[in-house]
Amino acid sequence: MIRITNGVARHPLWRMAEPINLHIEKGEQIAIVGDNAAGKSRLVEVLTGHYPLLLNEVQFDFSPSKSSLVSDNLKYISFRDSYGEQDGTYYYQLRWNQHDIAEDTPKVGQLLRSNTFSQMFHLDELADKYIISLSSGELRKFQMAKALATNPRILILDNPFIGLDAQTRKDFRNLLETLTREANMLVILVLSKRDDIPDFITHVLPVEGLRLLSKMRLEEYRKQYAAIPRPELSEEIMDWIADLPVRELKESDFYPHNGGEILRFKDVSIRYGERTILQPLNWTVHEGERWALSGPNGSGKSTLLSLVCADNPQAYACNIELFGHRRGTGESIWQIKKHIGYVSPEMHRAYLKDIPSIDVVASGLSDSVGLYVRPKPEQKQTCLDWMRVFGVDGVADRSFLQLSSGEQRLCLLARAFVKDPELLILDEPLHGLDDRNRSLVRQIIKQFCLRKHKTLVMVTHYQEELPDCITHSLHLGS
């Protein structure tokens, strides 16, 4: 169905380390697997024609399709598509500021007619919801349902399972398997997490160091990589984190003296029109606790966190106490954010900017999104130190847009840690990370939270992503 012979991208910046030689036969189902920045997305951009080749073009056999057009037969959902389109009117908190959403902003029902896929993903009940206000998981399901509705011959999905709750992941795997069997569809999954490879996949295309390695049968690939040991965080990094100075905190710093309650919700609920986003909730978090926040897609997890981070204006209508102070009693947004380090899918979307990566990290020092100031020399060293902790100090001067999605996420994690916050809020922090980085980041989170005055709230749909230091859990219903 697909053949590339000695493929070399026209533009030097798009090239792999070696010419691409690839053939995919009818009946095969493919997983492209590799570490962050290995070249997976670059390979797919060649497959889809986004990166044209110098001499030999990609050859396709779409039979029995009546159309020979690539646009009719091949659909690709990239990692960036899971965060939706961005235009000049978009800003980070827009999802929670419904009054700022333009009247012509499309709704789910306008872009997706009811069909088998929209029903399977429970999208029909979201028909009147703005695309911009969907959760990251809901948006991912919307993009996949829209692509599947076109009945493509070839479907390429970049990390399709991230952001989906456990039941949706199971249902989607079953759906893809059915489509490969009954609809004669070629599915190509681009995966950073090896455990996400479904059983219906027949062959794996490993990508390492911008090189496409030989195609392997799934059983052979699993056997070869099963023995890879979990990486350990270096003692140097662990000691560096442990030895960070402890900041002495007083009530004048908008922080409770001697710790105590960091967060208290009293019968907090959120509604937009007729839609209830967050059911009445009572929740108290004390200093030093490490919370796991879970729940299905659309249950209100990110909305809850937006209340904590002062990103949601409805917080002022709710009975919320943060750092020992009732919201709306004279505190500024900067007093709140001073003690909070935050990363989320929404933040990843807001930071798709063509600026040096170190400037993205440095923006965490001033809690700015959209206003970027070159860091002072002493601040730059702090940023580089945290980028070194997360293994991305080597890309500090590269444009954020030139990084792989995994490298971007690591930079955003460094941004969350850079000011040594007292409250760390991590919403799906391991999105798009490979197995090695997932393990290392979990260890970094644990080491950081063992220090004095550190409190954690972490959202994930994968229980194995949670660090060993978790002490409490909160589950939100649908």
Image: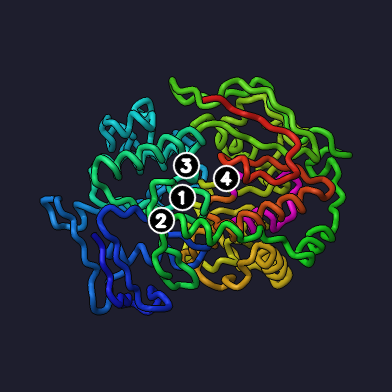
Q: Is residue 313 visible?
A: no
Q: Quadrant for the N terminus, please.
A: bottom left
Task: Give the Cα separation between the discs numbered 2 and 1.
Answer: 7 Å
Which label sits on residue 428? Answer: 4
Dot 2 or dot 3: first in sequence order is: 2
For the point 40% across and 78% down, the residue is 18
For the point 35% across and 37% down, the residue is 175
Amino acid marked by disc 2:
Ala
**Magenta region includes residue 415:** yes
Amino acid marked by disc 1:
Ile
What residue occupies the far left of the structure in this picture?
A: 66
Say which of 224 and 192 sits in front.
224
- The residue labelled by disc 2 is 31
Tell me whether circle 3 and circle 4 mark residues in contact (CB < 8 Å).
Answer: yes
Dot 3 or dot 1: first in sequence order is: 3
Say which of 246 and 315 sits in front.
246
Q: Residues within 10 Å of mark 2 (few under 14, many from 20)?
A: many
Dot 4 or dot 2: first in sequence order is: 2
Task: Give the Cα separation between the discs numbered 3 and 1.
Answer: 21 Å
In the displayed structure, does residue 43 sit left or right of residue 242? left
Say which of 155 and 335 sits in front.
155
Q: Identify the element where label 2 is drawn.
A: strand
In the displayed structure, does residue 437 sit left or right of residue 25? right
Dot 1 or dot 4: first in sequence order is: 1
- The residue labelled by disc 1 is 197
Looking at the rendered image, the disc whose residue lies closer to the viewer, 4 or 2, is 2
Residue 273 lies, in percent from the top left, at: 44, 23
Dot 2 or dot 1: first in sequence order is: 2
Task: Give the Cα separation between the discs numbered 3 and 4.
Answer: 10 Å
- Magenta region, residue range: 412-429
